Amino acid sequence: MAARLAAINKGIYASIVVRLRSIGTSSSADLPPRTNAASERFILEQISDLLSVDLGANSIESSQKTLNVVASEEKPSRSCVLDGLLSPEERLRGVFIQKLVGKAAVEAALSSAGVSLTAEIIAGVLDNGNLGGAAMVSFFDWAIKDPQIPDNLDTYHIVLKALGRRKFFVHMEEILRRMTEKGVHPDSKTVSVITDCYARARHVSKAVKFFDRLSDLGGEKNGDSFTAVIRSLCRRSHVRVAESFLRRNKGNLPPIKTAFDEILAGWAKLGRVKNMKTTWKEMIESGISPDSTTYSHLIEGLGRARMIKRAVRVFNQMEEKGCSPDTATYNSIIFNFTSAGKLDRGSFFYREMIAKNKSPNSYTYQILISAFIRARRVADALEMFDEMMGRGICPTTGMITSFVHPLCRFGPPHAAMLIYKKSKKEGCVVSLKAYKFLLMRLSRFGKCGMILQVWNEMQESGYSSDAEVYEFIVEGLCNNGQLDTAVLVVEESIKNGCCVGRIVYSKLNNRLLEMDKVETAYRLLLKVKKARALLNSQKYWRSRGWHF
């Protein structure tokens, strides 16, 4: 047993030394020069904190002498080194790994982390990681005391969403009780957050009962709160429960058109034509006249039920009933035809939409462009994309990714690069996922110049390169025979704490041996082995909860 512990401690010590050397080499411009005694003292401090080892009197005396020797020099700050390794969210979550006893100890440790709190940091701590319900409430109690954090509903919505997402409903109810005691009353957005969490976990009865006890929490039972409950239930496909909830409260609240629209949209999403008829009839009996939004849900539901001819007939009868089709209605009919593979009919209604001066929106173009790409009509997709940009409609980040992804799965990357360049020219934000798709496709075709250009633009956009990005670049350089550049990229990835996969490295190594560059391959092998050892050590630390 003692030999095993000694071996573990030796491995930890070696991993720490390797890590500190890498930190020292990567940040040598920022840290002052250190003596051997100062480095040894720093390593001993890290080991004693990690393994809870008491250094003893002799060690304290020797450490004091060491500190006196380097008193004239500036000692490297341990917190500065760790701050470079961990994000503010990780530093705050790491406090709960220590299993501190007592509320005062936890709050003192959180305060000593030296993090300037914002709403984004609080959301990052609560939404990510694996904190328990009690730890999340304890952290929120400490964070709400910060003067920079407002004690309002928006702040409470952050912790309510995080607790509800992980099904910590007991702690979520505790936060609601504290809100009532502080005089912070829930509104319609709070109702939407709570009921959505319950509906997502399939606790439908609790979602419905929350509206009934809204008055006890200081909230108001109005039309907005009522519609929020129905919207949350329909969004999670609990349409039948939402319909029953609507009928039960028919005498307590006046008829609300938005509530009927949400239920109709829920049935349309499921393609239940019979249920849509029932809801439509109840809406008419309640004295509510359908508008273009109601018709758009009806047309979409008929299309999902493969009743396209009937959907067209309803569309054509709209003007006869005194309701002119709007953009949403045209989007529904275009969506029906494109889903059925009838792209020409979808384009016909698009041209008719423009002829009647109905302005298409981004969703209109997303439907058409995605349908053209699925049908591999790339020229039509690019033409529609140009028309969208000509109308001043810039694609969102998600739209660009949805266009680039399928285009990078077949054929050359020319069309994907055209969409990427035009989007960048208009100032649109491109996601990291889209950059990876482009690099992957360019690497397979050996477009080295374009790979390096896209990589440079990705870094200028604020994205950092990970192991997957480096693998795409190295593979593209290998396919084009630029082995020296590939070796430089691998070395840069090692300096940045990444290591390429074994398949890509094996491909590069074989190419180097084929070109008789044995010495280069050997030097690269030593660096990769060292980087993999460090990476394995980091994975071991993280698996044990050692954020070191």
Image (cartoon, rainbow, N blue to C red):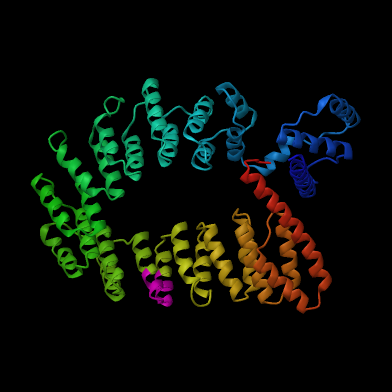
The percent position of residue 482, horizontal first and vertical second, equals 72, 74
Residue 91 falls left or right of residue 145: right
**Residue at position x 88%, y 32% from top?**
70
The furthest residue to the front: 1
Q: In which quarter of the image is residue 485?
A: bottom right
Would residue 420 be visible to someone looking at this image? yes
**Residue at position x 83%, y 40% from top?**
32
The furthest residue to the left: 285
The percent position of residue 358, horizontal first and vertical second, equals 27, 62
Work out whether 540 lies above or below 59: below
- Count how many numbered circles sit on residues in the image: 0
Task: For the C terminus, give its image quadrant.
Answer: top right
Task: For the N terminus, give its image quadrant.
Answer: top right
The range drawn in magenta is 371-384
**Residue at position x 75%, y 33% from top?**
48
Would residue 116 be visible to someone looking at this image? no
Is residue 373 inside the magenta stretch? yes
Is residue 374 inside the magenta stretch? yes
Q: In which quarter of the image is residue 162?
A: top left
Residue 378 falls left or right of residue 312: right
The percent position of residue 468, horizontal first and vertical second, equals 61, 61
Q: In which quarter of the image is residue 486?
A: bottom right
The front one of 51 and 402 is 51
Work out whether 11 lies above or below 176: below
Residue 64 falls left or right of residue 355: right
The front one of 53 and 85 is 53
The percent position of residue 543, horizontal first and vertical second, equals 62, 46
Work out whether 507 lies above or below 88: below
* Predominant SS along the magenta part: helix
